[in-house]
Image: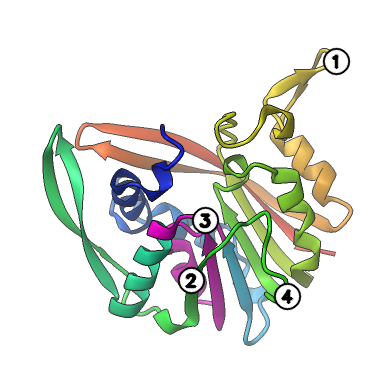
Amino acid sequence: MPDHYYDSQRAASEYLLLHYGDQEPWRLPFPARCVTGCLAVDLLPEGARALDLGCAVGGGSFELARHCAQVIGIDASKSFIALARRLRERGSCRFKSCVEGELMRTRRAVVPREIDRKRASFEVGDAVRLRGDLGMFDVVMMANLIDRVPAPRRLLEQLPSLLKRGGQLIITSPYTWMAQYTPRAQWLGGFERGGRRVQTFAALKGILSPYFKLSQRRNIPFLIREHARKFQLGIAEASVWLRR
């Protein structure tokens, strides 16, 4: 997978399907299931603000906008952000997905009509080096991001200053550590140290526990469609944390 994968046409197609497609056996797309399965709506204050880090093509940001008055989606991919902005403006967009080989099919990604798209805004940015004037949030969501940044510990260490007291932090990841995205020395888990197996959730707990209380932990499966007869099945572990 080349370094520019997340700005490629292939990635755009795969992620539009992941965020807006109707893929069996799940009724809702992956970002919608992250929000519905993890967000405690009853804990949100009036006028809640949310930050969607690694927002990709914006499906999770729009789902957060069902419940939050303002949502900021940030992603490093210019192509993904351009698509998210187009969806915000128009409510839908057409794209091509692979059937097999060079055969393509035209599809349409649609933001559910009941969502107020104006609540969401999108910008290109580095999740590890966020701009300093973002302010504080009632929700921060990071869906399948921590194993795709060069410095995941630094990413996590920013979070206490971004979340208000009682705020909700939603992290999902299949923990697919790869040196092309994260130098091995920066991995949070997936290796042995001193004869002990180091796993990612233990590292998350060690970094976050001084500032956050674990609220829930669950698995959320997802499918990335490569073509009509080939899918990648992933199982993201979701953990939800409340700011102390």
Query: Which is nearer the eye, 140 or 222?
Result: 140
Residue 240 image position (x, y, % from top left): 68, 55
CA gap, disc 2 and disc 3 = 11 Å
Q: Amino acid at mark 4?
A: Met
Q: For the residue carrying disc 2, how many other residues have a C-alpha within 10 Å: few (<14), some (14-19), or many (20+)? A: many
Which mark lies nearer to you, 2 or 3? 3
Q: What type is the residue that disc 1 sits on?
A: Gly
Q: What residue occupies the far right of the structure in this picture?
A: 210
Which is more N-terminal, label 2 or label 1? 2
The quadrant in which residue 149 appears is top right
Asked if residue 27 lies in the magenta stretch, the reply is no
Residue type at mark 2: give it: Phe
Residue beneath disc 4: 136
The residue beneath circle 2 is 122
Task: Give the labeled residue for mark 1.
Answer: 194
Mark 1 to mark 2 CA distance (whole Å): 43 Å
Q: Is residue 102 left or right of residue 186?
A: left
Q: Is residue 184 left or right of residue 105?
A: right
Q: Which span of residues is magenta-colored?
A: 53-79
Specify the quadrant of the image occupied by residue 81.
Answer: bottom left
Marks 2/4: CA–CA distance: 17 Å
- Percent coordinates x, y for residue 199 in the rendering: 72, 29
* Residue highlighted by disc 3: 76
